[in-house]
Amino acid sequence: MDYIITGGVKQALLEQCMRWNELSEENCSMARTISVIGDRWTLLILRDCFLRVRRFEDFQERLGITRPILANRLKKLVDEFVLVKVPYQQRPRRYEYRLTQKGLALYPIVMAIVHWGDVYMAGKKGRPLVHSHDLCGKAFDPMMVCSECGEQLSPKQVHVRPGPSAKDPRHLPLETDLPGPRRLAKEKAAS
């Protein structure tokens, strides 16, 4: 990202950091999640974590990322309990980065991004990696299903309504998406 700001690079980084911090305070699950995993390096680090990469040097070599940026992203993931540092060597002391339960819960998100890339960005030669399910031995494509009925979800078959902590009408669906009772719920949450 290039910035042209009279305050220089430090000022630009400070302003970018402030915007990320603001996202973490939003009353929106998407914004809060993006504040943790929403930049390209973090997503690529997570991809590599799911490919069983654990050591700083291995991340750096695979990603071609500078040490300060990598250290910053790993620290943020540790601070957010997405990764945990585990010592693997005592002298000098060195650490591996392992996914926590909170980190493992990001697997569907990472796989959804991978699948989108396989479908829309892979080109004529096809996908670069094939994922196989250990239990059945078959290559698969990730899909999202309803936790209640098991049917595959489509955006046209899902409606959103305010939850118990809904406060900001900016994060609620447009009224055109809401049938009568849901529109009333939105109006109630907004007041």
Image: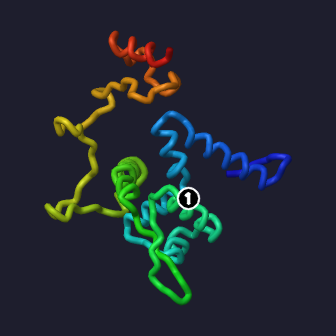
Residue with the mark numbered 1: 76
Name the residue located 26 percent from the left edge and 52 percent from the top edge.
Answer: 141
Write down the quadrant of residue 53 in the picture.
Answer: bottom left
Q: Is residue 5 above or below residue 171?
A: below
Label tally:
1
Name the residue furthest left.
136
Q: Specify whether residue 42 is in view.
A: yes
- Where's residue 100, x and y in %? 39, 62
Q: Is residue 63 above or below residue 27?
A: below
Q: Nearer the viewer, residue 94 or 49?
A: 94
- Where's residue 121, x and y in %? 43, 51
Q: Is residue 163 above or below residue 17?
A: above
Crowd around label 1: few <14 · some 14–19 · many ≥20 (10 Å) = some
Q: Specify whether residue 123 is in view.
A: no
Name the residue furthest right.
6
Q: Is residue 117 above or below residue 160?
A: below
- Where's residue 54, x and y in %? 44, 73
Name the residue located 22 percent from the left edge and 39 percent from the top edge.
Answer: 147
Name the residue located 33 percent from the left edge and 25 percent from the top edge.
Answer: 159
- Where's residue 136, x and y in %? 14, 61
Write down the quadrant of residue 102 in the picture.
Answer: bottom left
Badge 1 element: helix
- 36 sits left or right of 2 in the view: left
Amino acid type of the residue tagged 1 in the rendering? Lys
